[in-house]
Amino acid sequence: ADTEAKPPAEPEEDRETVLKKVQDVLEELLSKENLQEDTFMQMNMNAQMQIAICIIGNHHKMEALGPCADISTILEAALRSENLNVDKDEMLVRPVIKTKRNTVILRDLPDGIPEEELKDLFESCPAVKELISVKPDVNNTAFVTFENDTAAQDAALWLRSQKLRGGSIKCHIKSEQFLRSFFPMPGMAGAPTPGMPAWAMGGQAMMWGGVAWPGQWAMGQEMWGMDAGAWAEG
């Protein structure tokens, strides 16, 4: 009897190709954009935005890569990435969050100072070409935004030698903390349990009650101790 010819086996991908695919998925899962929407990632992160590599291996996007995306490969891929920070002892990975520092906050300003007067102050600033906006705010403060971090730093240094209505100018650079918006400081009203992001409280909490990974969430709680810990600065 004729035997059917077996189709040729697909060649295995080389190690470098596999690592590149796994690294791309890792960086996508731990990107700012994905972390704002991905409930699986949100619910399995601890207060320092770390997540167990074994748990990431169960994410549907990682599982879609097939058997090649095993724990050792995920770890190796994470260690190659400049966008990720890895704790090899605890087998945890977290994103490297780059914060923006392009806004100078002026404080203790004279009562009722108008926006135009503040803008006039910056006319002779070395970074005036990178100035985006000057916005007075409550409590005698104002927010001065520049195009980049360097311009904001130059402006802050320059302000130390300037006077406003005869007095010195107090200022500091504002840091846009993505992590602060992801996990509120402990003790704040409505702050969630450490390890759970802000939006896990309130309206969406009921929706998440029936997700498919309660066992993994419990495992993560046990693994990380869930006793607050240090709140990272990002």
Image (tube, grey):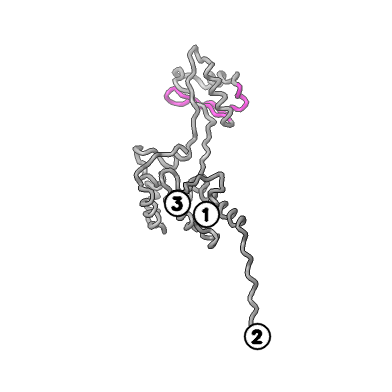
Image mark for residue 74: 1
Residue 63 shown left or right of residue 224 in the figure? right
Image mark for residue 215: none
- Depth order, front residue of 106/30: 30
What amino acid is labelled 3 in the image? Ala
Residue at left offset 48%, top offset 25% = 172
- Depth order, front residue of 40/51: 51
Q: CA separation, marks 1 and 2?
A: 45 Å
- Depth order, front residue of 23/44: 23
Task: Point out the tag, 2 or 3, that comes first from the N-terminus.
Answer: 2
Q: From the viewer's perspective, is the residue at label 1 or at label 2 nearer?
A: 1
Residue 115 belongs to the span the image colors magenta = no
Write down the residue under mark 3. 52
Q: Which residues are magenta?
A: 126-146
Write down the residue under mark 2. 2
Q: Secondary structure at mark 3?
A: strand
